[in-house]
Amino acid sequence: MKQKTMKIPQEPIKPEHCASAKALNIPISTKFGVELSDNLRYKKTSFAKSFLEDVIALKRAVPFKKSVNDLGHKKGMAAGRFPQKAAKEFLKLVKSVEANAQVKGLNTSELKIIKIISNKASTPLTGGRLRRGTKRTHIEIVVRELPGSKKKSYDKKEQKQDKVMEKKADVPVAPVKPVEEMPVGVEETLQHDVPVDVEELQEKSQEKQQPEQAVFEKSQRSVEEPVTKPVAEPKPTIVKDIPLKEVSSSELLKQAQAKAAELNKKEKKNEAVQEVESLYDTLKQKGTLRGTASKPRYGNKGDIQ
């Protein structure tokens, strides 16, 4: 009879809290990849990086559990090796997964490797006569952000503080009476237990306040009233007598000739105008113009008087 095993229900993994990375056709041994993945599964990425760096530096050996034929012992373990080449490729993949998680907005210091698998890839043959097969491996890794355990305890503390504050708010508080202001100088006299006239002290305080008010009013007036600067009167301009140039006789003659030519032109125009007017007058007398033209002897064509 087979024993029945009880399956523990697991919480569904949300893709929002996970990040993954793959490396295909890596030139490493599949056996070494399987042993490394078994040692890194369900570990934090911070531990995985430190572990792989120690393997590369030959400080820590990887314990082998499956392929252990004729394998020597290492310090602190049974069979083990230092797969440096495979460790370098795994370290690159872990760093790339952290970068993918950072892009998603996950906390890189709280990442756990929930899936890491090494599978055998295709074995391409080498060139030459022997045609030997090479080593190729596929690696896949998935990490998940760990739920914060500190947040729950912090939430409980906050709840306790809120309850305490609510209790304090429920306690009634007695009303506080307003304190009356005392005139200046009363406090000093009360300390010595001497009888004091309150009216005299009030008068003194008013006398002290009056010069302060006067200064304040002056400052306001100076701000409100615009400052008018005296306008400078324009200086009288001194006109100097400029000596006139003497005109030569030749220039005067030229000016006179030009004016005479203009007058001749005007006279010619006037004569032409008079001639035109006389012609119009003669035409009017003869009746050849439209306004004074004589009517035809007969009316329309064909009409006979």
Image (tube, rainbow, N blue to C red):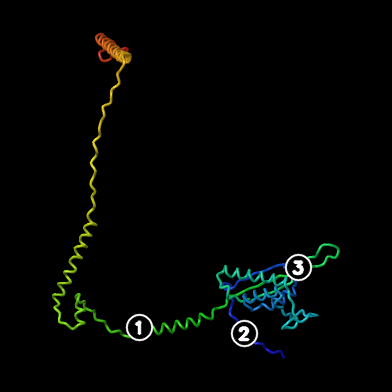
- Mark toward the start of the polypeptide (3 vs 1): 3
- Mark toward the start of the polypeptide (2 vs 3): 2
* Residue 9, visible in the rendered structure: yes
Please give the residue where the numbered disc 1 appears in the rendered image. Answer: 169
Quadrant (top left/top right/bottom left/bottom right) for the N terminus: bottom right
Q: Which mark is residue 122?
A: 3
Whole-angstrom CA distance, mark 2 to mark 1, is 47 Å
Please give the residue where the numbered disc 2 appears in the rendered image. Answer: 8
Residue type, mark 1 in image: Ala
Rendering coords of residue 158 (x, y %)? 45, 81
Q: Residue furthest bottom?
A: 1
Rendering coords of residue 205 (x, y %)? 18, 72
Residue 298 against residue 185 in the figure, above or below:
above
Secondary structure under the numbered disc 2 in the rendered image:
loop
Residue type, mark 3 in image: Ser
Viewer-nearest of discs 2 and 3: 3
Secondary structure under the numbered disc 1 in the rendered image:
helix
- Mark toward the start of the polypeptide (2 vs 1): 2
Q: Nearer the viewer, residue 233 or 91?
A: 233
Residue type, mark 2 in image: Ile
Whole-angstrom CA distance, mark 3 to mark 1, is 73 Å
> Quarter-wise, where is residue 211 in the image?
bottom left
Residue 153 as seen in the image, left or right of residue 112: left
Numbered label tally: 3
Viewer-nearest of discs 2 and 1: 1
Rendering coords of residue 11 (x, y %)? 58, 80
Count residues near mark 3 (Cα–Cα under 10 Å), then give few for <14, some for 14-19, many for 20+: few
Residue 122 as seen in the image, left or right of residue 157: right
Residue 281 against residue 149 in the figure, above or below:
above
Q: Residue at x 69, y 70 (%)?
A: 88
Q: Residue at x 50, y 83 (%)?
A: 153
